[in-house]
Each structure stands twice: as C-alpha cells, then as structure tokens.
Image: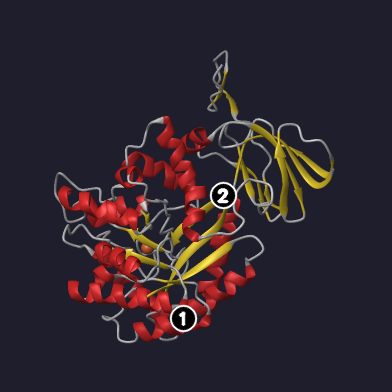
Amino acid sequence: MSFDCLLTGGILPDGSTADIAITGETITAIGPKLDGTARDTIDISGNLVSAPFVDPHFHMDATLSYGIPRINKSGTLLEGIGLWGELKPQLTHEAVKQRALEYCDWAVTQGLLAIRTHVDVCDDRLLAVEALLEVQKEVADYIDLQLVAFPQDGLYRSPNALQNTLRALDLGVDVVGGIPHFERTMADGRRSVTELCEIAAKRGLPVDMHCDETDDPQSRHIEQLIFETQRLGLQGRVAGSHLTSMHSMDNYYVSKLLPLMAEADVSAIPNPLINITIQGRHDTYPKRRGMTRVPEMLAHGIRVGWGQDCVLDPWYPLGNADMLDVAFMGLHVAQMTSPADMTSCYDMVTNQNAAIMGLPDYGLSPGKKASLVVLDAGNPIEAIRLRPERLLVMAKGKVIALRERQDTEVTLPGRPSRVNRRHRAG
Ligand code: FE2
C-alpha cells in the first residue's frame, strides 16, 4: 500500500501503540506496524495522538475584547452582560472578524479544530453574525465552526430579538440558542424555551440554550427544555449549556429531573472555568461553586461535554484556547479524580463534545477525516496533568501546526540528575 502520510508509533488514547496512514483528507488505516510506503513519514513514537479538541460552547464575537471599554468589576454574569451592552455599539465588522481570526489561530496551535460559538443577535445590524459567517467560511479548511443564534439580552426582553433570531437563521446560522433565565419573568423564560424549540423543530435545526445560568435553585428552565425536546421529537439534537442552578437545587427534585433528561437525550455543557468564577458571587461562606452535577449526570447516561465559554472578554479575564485547561478545572470541581474519571474528562473534550456538535467523520479510525493532534504526553491523564505542547496538528490530512519538541528534561545546577515532568511508569 502507498499512502500520502504515515505517522508512526503514536500512543492512542486507549493506551495502544499504532501507526496512522493518511491518504488525501482521510485516515485509511490504523494499526501496529503498518506495511506500506508513504510520501511523508513522521515519527511520533512515545507521544499521545488523538482526534482534535472540540469546544461546544464559546463566544467568538466577544473574545479578545477584555478591557474594552472597561473591565468587569463585580465579576458577575449580570455586570458582564451590561458591559457587553456598552461594547456592542462600538463593535465593527472588521474588529469582530480580526479578533475571531486571531482566536482561531490560537485554537489551531492548541489542536482545537471544532468550535460551537454563540453569536449575539440582539444588535439589529447583525454585524457579528455577518462577520462570523465570513470567518466560518475562511477557516473551513481547518476549523469546523458552528454558529448559534443567541438572543443575549432576552428573546422577549430585547425588542427585536425574536425577529433578529429568525433573520440570523435565514442567513445560515446553524443552531437555535436562548437565555430563558434572563427573560423578565419565569413565565417568559418558559415561553421562550417553547417558542425557540418550535423554531428549531420547524427548521430542522439543533438547539443549544444558555439554561439556568444562575444560583437560583428555583430556575428550572431545563425542565421545560426536556419537555419540549420530547414533545417536538428533538431527541439527540438539544443541549442545555451551563445548568448551574442544578448545583443549588433540591436533591429530591434533581432525582426526578436527571432520568427525564436522559430519557429525552438532552446533553449538558458545563463550562467549569466560567461557572466557578461567575457563580456564587452573592454568597458569603459557604460559597457555592455553581458548576452543575456532572458525575451524577454521567451516572444517568446523560452526554456531558466541557465547554470553554469565554477567553479574555467581559466575563473572563483569562483563557488560552486550551481545552485541557477546561478539562483540568472541570475534573477538580467535579472531583472526578479516579483514573477512569480523568480519562473520561479527556474523552469529554474530544469525542463527547464532537458528538454534541454532531460532527460528521470525526475520530481516529479508518474512513474518518484525518484531523488529529499529537501531544508531548504519554496518555490522556498525563495530558490533563501537564497540559503540554501540541507537537503536531493536522486538519484534513494537512499539517497545520508543527512545533519542535522542547527538551522536557531540565538540568538543575548542583543536582546529579535531570528533571522530566513526564512520568513513565516501569
Ligand atoms: Fe456562554
């Protein structure tokens, strides 16, 4: 057999060692010691190779705007929304696009090759929608960018939000979003979930709503989202993002809710970096951390993915496009420290997030798209522990980022041995 490219000796996430053969944009074979010749052979032996990272929840219209026009002093969601409202009239098509493209470059270097971004539709100009639709086309060769029509200021609370949501979907936005906990009343929130799910059902689109992003244990819009998913036959196409109120809900109520969520095949997207910095801001002590009930959801068979949400914007002053940072924080907050749980956190920022986004041809197996990342780590747990350099990133058969391997061994003056933070048992 002859291939375009052969990656040799990589360690797959399941711990096995394999060669990966690529022809054109496709993985054609995977196995130990493949026979055949290749135009390019790249030795990746001893390094973890996996399908690329996927972020199912982001705000690309706001990213890299930190400090414009000022920073969020209280650190709350509501001040962040207010601050974004101050920034919105100053946005230009060019600035939104330039920041988004810069973020996409960051993403590439981190092996992050699929992103679902919410885009605010409350500005009648739909400037951010148009800018991100252009970015979506420009990065299509290396990033799967999905857009969610997001009425940030409330579907009913903001005068033209419903109209603008429909306009954005007409322009080609892929997913229907919402923010029921920000409507004026619980009843309006509930009504918004129904109306948005009906729009999605009518247009054959997925739904991904900011849902119950609050510490209020009475915020139960997830219940309505589950109900509408069942009623409208949207099973497998709906995600509830954040779901932070579930952190504070009554345990008995949650014991009824989670089986209903599993039955309707509604996915959950917690965003640990943001949830634990934004929630609990009105508490003294004990101070709630606000992240939703991830291990309990997984135990019920609910699909859960970790999202990034924000990088350098009105809500979050840090971030680096690294889904391993997200998995690292999620693992700590959810206390998912067993080997199986830690491995599952890696799976969440790759395969589970891809399933939530409905990505076709994703994964490391023959016939799938040849998109992958090689990390300076020996296994998924070590990748989360070290959040190491991405040595090679490939999109659809093309190497799009390549980094010389740094010497991970450091000599400490006066000591007899060198230090290497990678741990090789045995
Ligand atoms: Fe968000």
Q: Position of residue 139 (x, y in %)?
A: 62, 66
Q: Position of residue 252 (x, y in %)?
A: 15, 49
Q: Is residue 253 left or right of residue 88?
A: left
* Amino acid type for the residue under numbered disc 2: Gln
Q: Position of residue 7 (x, y in %)?
A: 73, 40
Q: Label 2, label 1: how many angstroms apart (C-alpha)? A: 30 Å
In the depicted view, which residue is nearer to us: 95 or 28? 28
Q: Is residue 207 above or below residue 217?
A: below
**Structural crowding at the residue carrying mark 2, measured as other residues with C-alpha within 10 Å and reported as few (<14), some (14–19) or many (≥20):** many
Rendering quadrant holding ligand 1? bottom left
* Amino acid type for the residue under numbered disc 1: Ala
Q: Is residue 142 left or right of residue 166?
A: right
Residue assigned mark 1: 168
Give the quadrant of the C terminus.
Answer: top right
Residue assigned mark 2: 110
Residue 423 visible at all: yes
